[in-house]
Amino acid sequence: MTVNQIYTLMNTVTGEILGKSDIVAEDLSNVVDIGKELFSNTDVDNYVKSLVNHIGKVIFVNRPYAGNVPSMIMDSWEFGSVLEKIQADMPAATENKSWELTDGQSYDPNVFYQPKVSAKFFNSRVTFEVPMSFTEKQVKDSFSSAAQLNGFVSMIYNAVDKAMTVKIDALIMRTIDNMIGQTLHAEFPSVSNGDYSKVSGIKAVNLLKLFNDHRKAQGIDLALTAEEAITDPDFIRFASYTMGVTADRMTKMSTLFNVGKKERFTPADALRVVMLSDFQKAAKTYLYSDTRHSELVTLPDAETVPYWQGSGQNYSFANVSDIHVNIADGSGHTVEINASGILAVMYDKDAMGVCNSDRRVTTNYNAKAEFYNNFYKYDASYFNDLNENFVVFFVA
């Protein structure tokens, strides 16, 4: 063990704290230990110079990770692989003959009116596994008690569990990302370069374009950028108004809010909203805190996510609000979607989901080499139903 004399540093620090001297550069390299990956067994005591230093306490990095993604897990079933979703089209109205009776005319009540029913089938599954080997006999020599050994094994179990959680969470977010991509492509099929700054629609709402157009109509020519918008109180009010109106409109039967152009409505108890946390936190900081009746301008209740696809290396707004995915176009081809500035999605709970989730562990013991192999396996079906309501809000 290295022991360093730091009395000179302590005298200097005391003078700085008491205001007796100016702040000077302090050498902390011999004060704070930043650790090293390998422990040297040549480290000896400072008494007889021959006793090897022993490990006094062992700490395992073993904090559980619960994950944080929108709730999408649905039910599972044991037999069969296909999820079938059946719908009936709304029938058209016909002439009511009760008020146009003609003497001597026959009115046939035996005409067959067949309902228009269609079915959609979801029959794909994704899978992966995380393998991990465990030993007991070979690792016992590295610990001084059974409690330490159990703590070590528990840490490895927890590391595997965290790895599984991160990967499953990522798949749930990719389910949302794919639906965003499908909606953008359906709403703006002519956009191929990722530049959505000049477009806005019903299912894909460019809040920044609408806001800047609104201000220009009022004679205000100063246009906001995407990053400026999320901290601008006036923009946040406009966004809250637009999202609130959209939620109300989705409660009425319409074909405008889904890619499949089906007659759908989304009551309030079936509406789900997922919002980028940058935007939600900005609203609380820059708008609600300075508004007397903040409940009048509050954004819809929402689950929040720190990013849609990833944080990048700096958590910049451009990274956390971005998706860059290839989606299926329904004809056997893929389309590249690259869009940034995504603030929120608003959708029917039946539009997306994860079903038939199966998380399990299989084990094999190797008697020759005396170790266990655990295989942590995961299967699930992730789906987007383009016939259900889904709206994406973005700034570009």
Image: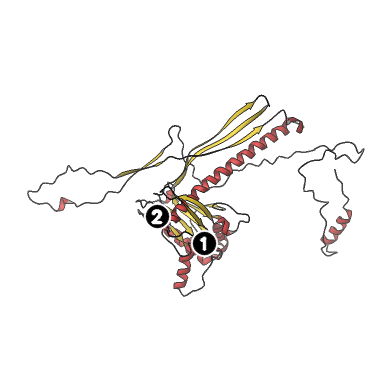
CA separation, marks 1 and 2?
29 Å
Badge 2, how many Cα within 10 Å: few under 14, some, many 20+?
Answer: many
Residue 253 x, y percent position in the rendering: 35, 53
Residue 84 x, y percent position in the rendering: 39, 40
The quadrant of the rendering that contains the N terminus is top right
Query: Closer to the camera, 245 or 357?
Result: 357
Look at label 1 and name its amino acid. Answer: Ser
Badge 1, how many Cα within 10 Å: few under 14, some, many 20+?
Answer: few
What residue occupies the far top of the structure in this picture? 367
Q: Which residue is mark 1?
A: 294
Query: Closer to the camera, 163 or 6?
Result: 163
What residue occupies the far front of the structure in this picture? 333
Above or below, 149 against 316 in this view is above
Residue found at x 58% / y 61%: 285
Q: Which residue is mark 2?
A: 257
- Sequence-first disc among 1 and 2: 2
Query: Closer to the camera, 286 or 80?
Result: 80
| SS class, disc 2 | loop
Above or below, 360 against 240 in this view is above
